[in-house]
Amino acid sequence: EPEVTQTPSHQVTQMGQEVILRCVPISNHLYFYWYRQILGQKVEFLVSFYNNEISEKSEIFDDQFSVERPDGSNFTLKIRSTKLEDSAMYFCASSEVSSGLYSETQYFGPGTRLLVL
Amino acid sequence: RKEVEQDPGPFNVPEGATVAFNCTYSNSASQSFFWYRQDCRKEPKLLMSVYSSGNEDGRFTAQLNRASQYISLLIRDSKLSDSATYLCVGPASSGSARQLTFGSGTQLTVLP
């Protein structure tokens, strides 16, 4: 069964450093997403990506964040200058083409646990 | 009002019991919902999607009541392996149907 994969599984970084989280979505999916989950809190939407551009983003997704699809398989989330409050689990997800009226099922990767010190 | 609201629990039930979770939503235009389960420190995994009045898959039944704006999940003959946090998920009020909003989750523990 195809699945979303993410690397690394854990990342520890110093405050102010840049981190890049990587994801390989399911191969025939065209929509890609990043979510985050701070420990003990709910899953929060960050950004959606389609056709090589951001489709939607939340208020959390400020100028410190960027996404990219550098090749035909990877989808990355970059945090330019990490803050303590960026410590969270970051989930990548993907879905097939959505009609826009109905939400297509999104399949989640195992996540990258980011710890900012 | 929160976009998606769930009873956080915890629900502690004996093996074999039937348990039901409710979830209310604020966006009356929402057309589709999901129940995901999340094990501790793991990713959300799709349990069921709900596009019309309801859906059934084995021991799991989800129902959607548009008039009252709530979704329910019923688990029959619960197993130890059903212990997890159950997440009610729907589209965000702002943005398109692709921007999902998650409830805080309902924690279930099935006891032997």
Image (cartoon, coloured by chain):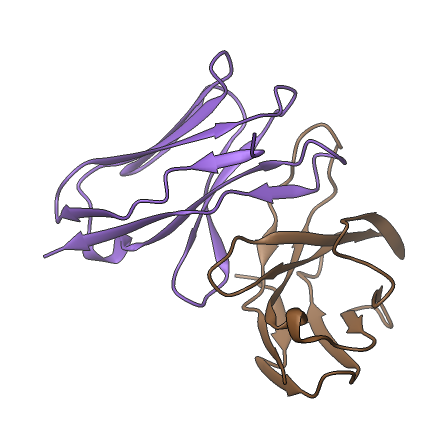
Chain colours: A brown, B purple
Q: Residue at x 44, y 27 (%)?
A: B71
Pinpoint residue A18: horizontal percent, then vertical percent. Answer: 80, 82
Query: Is residue A26 shown left or right of residue A73?
Result: left
- Measured from the top left, where is residue A33 in percent x and y? 71, 55
| For residue B111, above or below residue A64 | above
Q: How many marks?
A: 0
- The answer to whether residue A89 is visible is yes
- Decide if residue A29 is in sight here: no
When the figure is inspected, residue A27 is found, relative to residue B90, above or below; the finding is: below
Q: Residue furthest top?
A: B67
Q: Is residue A18 left or right of residue A105?
A: right
Q: Nearer the viewer, residue B43 or A78?
A: A78
Q: Nearer the viewer, residue A32 or B91?
A: B91
Residue B78, position as x, y percentages in the image: 20, 45
Q: Quadrant of the N terminus of chain B?
A: top right
Q: Position of residue A93 (x, y in %)?
A: 64, 57
